[in-house]
Amino acid sequence: MITLAEHLLRQSKELEGKLTAFRRDLHRYPELSTHEAETAGKVAAELRKLGYTPTTGVGGHGVVAELAGDRPGPVIALRADMDALPIQEETGLPYASARPGVMHACGHDGHTAMLLGAAELLMRNRDRLAGSVRLLFQAAEEINAGAKAMIADGVLEGVSEIYGLHNLPTLPAGQMAIRYGALMGSVDRIELTLEGKGGHGAIPDQSIDPIVAASAIVMGLQTAVSREMSPFEPAVVTIGSMHAGEANNVIPHQARLTGTVRTFSEAARQSMPGRLDRLIGGIAQAYRCKAELRYINQTAVLVNHDGPAEQVERIADLMLGAHNRKVAEPTMAGEDFSEYLLHVPGSFFWIGSGPDREAERAYGLHHPKFALNEACLPYGAALLAAIALLRSGQQPD
Ligand SMILES: [Zn+2]
Ligand SMILES: [Zn+2]
């Protein structure tokens, strides 16, 4: 007798052609964060064809649909993201982006197709469903805004558990990876303005040079991590942009810097604004500049809940075999799925989207040559459907 998990994977593989075609269409016509109107329209149309009654315009361009079983049980939420990135595609694929400077380089087109696949599998196996499944097609993940907007619009009301996935090109298709506890880092943004006093490049004594101060601050900030935090408490402070001056012989009035701050625990995250403020303020003062720091909280650390993570492992083992389940390495990259996990228990995992061999050499996420191995689509769809069915009351068989 085959298990429900195996049955779903078999059914899902029958959908491979359809999922691939849907994903390729999204890939060809990608939309940037907060502009996903067309994508959302396609998702809603597809859901209607499957028999759902989707709600659109949730948390921006998000789409939500629900399927209720005949028997009572909990509400299990599944989430996919839909937005693309401001990257010029260089894959040369026949279905490469038709929109200059916009690309699905993070595989959210694949995630959307997978959740639609799950929607179809759930509809087909509705008689096995207790409770209900809520499907969340989220917008604006790449700018860390969509999850918060969806939550503000009430998508978690009544939800018992939530699950989501992200493709991983360094893992072959057919495999998955998960980790207990913190999986992905927090993401915060800093914006710093330094004010000095402009003047002639040849007469520095009559000026206050914000470029020299900015340089000292960039160097000094590195000690916030290396000298102030435990080597066992990972954190990253990166200054990603620095703008000052126009002419070679003029000391500018102002320097502007922006950066990103990543941590791996909420405690470390909360310590960062104070540390950075003190270091920046002190250094700026030493260089006679005025500093103004804006610390903008974006996304929390993604922390998997133990119970749900264990369930995902169990279901992955049933479907893919334990040898195809890996222990995920932690990453400082962020993912706004973390916001849902602040409110309800759940778990996030990686689904392999790399080539069968030498996946470690595949182009990474956000690369102009990133290419999703579409063989991953039925696996993602089947896993999501199995999690929803098994967690909403169906006993594993
Ligand atoms: Zn991304
Ligand atoms: Zn992504």
Image (tube, grey):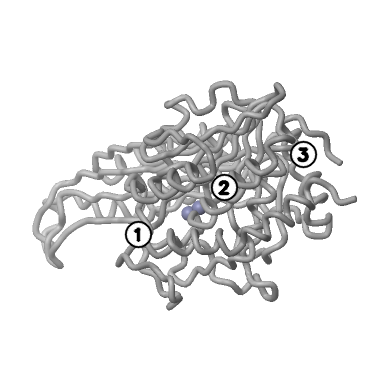
At 55% from the left edge and 66% from the top edge, which residue is drawn? 372
Quick one: 27 or 163, which is closer to the camera? 27
Which three-letter amino acid code belongs to the residue tagged 2?
Leu
Residue 90 screen position, x and y as percent: 41, 74
Which three-letter amino acid code belongs to the residue tagged 1?
Pro
Q: What kind of element bears circle 3?
A: helix
Q: Give the mark toward the camera: 2 or 3.
A: 2
Q: Which residue is mark 3?
A: 311
Quick one: 261 or 394, which is closer to the camera? 394
Q: Give the mark toward the camera: 1 or 3.
A: 3
CA gap between label 2 and label 3 equals: 19 Å
Q: Which residue is mark 1?
A: 86
At 35% from the left edge and 59% from the top edge, which residue is drawn? 86
Q: Which residue is mark 2?
A: 115
Residue 17 screen position, x and y as percent: 58, 64
* Res 374 seen here: yes
Q: Answer with mark 2 or mark 3, whichever residue precedes in sequence.
A: 2
195 lies above or below 329: above
Q: Answer with mark 1 or mark 2, whichever residue precedes in sequence.
A: 1
Disc 3 crowd, CA 10 A, few/some/many (<14, 14-19, 20+): some
Quick one: 5 or 46, which is closer to the camera? 46
Residue 288 screen position, x and y as percent: 24, 43
Q: Answer with mark 1 or mark 3, whichever residue precedes in sequence.
A: 1
Q: Are marks 1 and 3 in contact (CB under 8 Å)?
A: no
Left-right relation of 91 to 290: right
Disc 1 crowd, CA 10 A, few/some/many (<14, 14-19, 20+): some
Left-right relation of 353 to 80: right
Q: Are marks 2 and 3 in contact (CB under 8 Å)?
A: no
